[in-house]
Image (tube, rainbow, N blue to C red):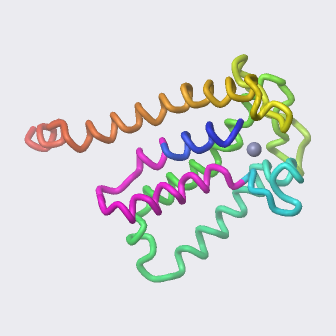
Amino acid sequence: MTQVGHILTGAAIGMLCKPDRRQPKWLLTYFGVFLLLANIPDLPFKNWGHDRYDISHSIFVNLLLIAVAGIVLSLPKGFQSRIGGWKVMVGGTAAWLSHLLLDSFYNHGYGIAIFWPLSDARLTLPLPWFSVVTEQTFLAAEGLREYFTEFVFYGSFLAVASIIKWASANLPLKKRARAL
Ligand SMILES: [Zn+2]
């Protein structure tokens, strides 16, 4: 998956668990963090990302990092409530782990060695319309078509998430349910 798919999925998950705060600066930081979380397994560090696809795309390695990050972030008093509570923590975890699932959608069918180092088994859920964008194709028509495909496919997730969020905040369903 290119960053387009990961970014839109991160934004969609962020939208679903977004607290009702509206300060533009806070929202910018909030969504920036979600976009980053959804791309963590691909970050171009040494022995990480596509340099070591087995390590960076292992569910065990990522869960360990998430646990460490969760513990470190929970240390400062009141941090969790400042970022919006446990829902945001769960959403951030989902955004991070969504990366592994999305990468299994490539149509080359190689999948990802998600259980490394315990197993070489590969998670592969190829969708016919998702192909790899390489250095050679990322500015060619083939690459641009892939970006567009991901934009439409994952953009629809973000649109649905935005509608759900808007509806839950603006439709009188909650009030009616409380009144019953
Ligand atoms: Zn990846």
Q: Position of residue 80 (x, y in %)?
A: 44, 70
Q: Is residue 39 above or below residue 113?
A: below
Q: Which residue extends farthest front?
A: 140
Number of dots carrying numbers: 0
**Residue 64, magenta (yes or no):** no
Q: Residue at x 68, y 23 (%)?
A: 145
Q: Position of residue 129 (x, y in %)?
A: 69, 19
- Magenta: main secondary structure: helix
Say whether residue 50 is left or right of residue 42.
right
Q: Quadrant of residue 121?
A: top right
> Ligand 1: which quarter?
top right
Q: Choose between 140 and 63: the one closer to the eye.
A: 140
Say whether residue 5 is left or right of residue 58.
left
Where does the magenta region start and end? 12-40
Q: Residue at x 42, y 32 (%)?
A: 159
Q: Position of residue 54 (x, y in %)?
A: 87, 48
Q: Quadrant of residue 172?
A: top left
**Residue 34, magenta (yes or no):** yes
Say whether residue 43 is left or right of residue 12.
right
Q: Which residue extends farthest top?
A: 128
Q: Residue at x 86, y 29 (%)?
A: 110
Q: Which residue extends farthest left?
A: 179
Q: Choose between 20 and 142: the one closer to the eye.
A: 142
Q: Residue at x 75, y 23 (%)?
A: 142
From the image, which quarter does the C terminus lie in? Answer: top left
Q: Is residue 59 above or below residue 22?
A: above
Say whether residue 90 is left or right of residue 39.
left
Q: Position of residue 21 (x, y in %)?
A: 30, 60
Q: Quadrant of residue 147?
A: top right
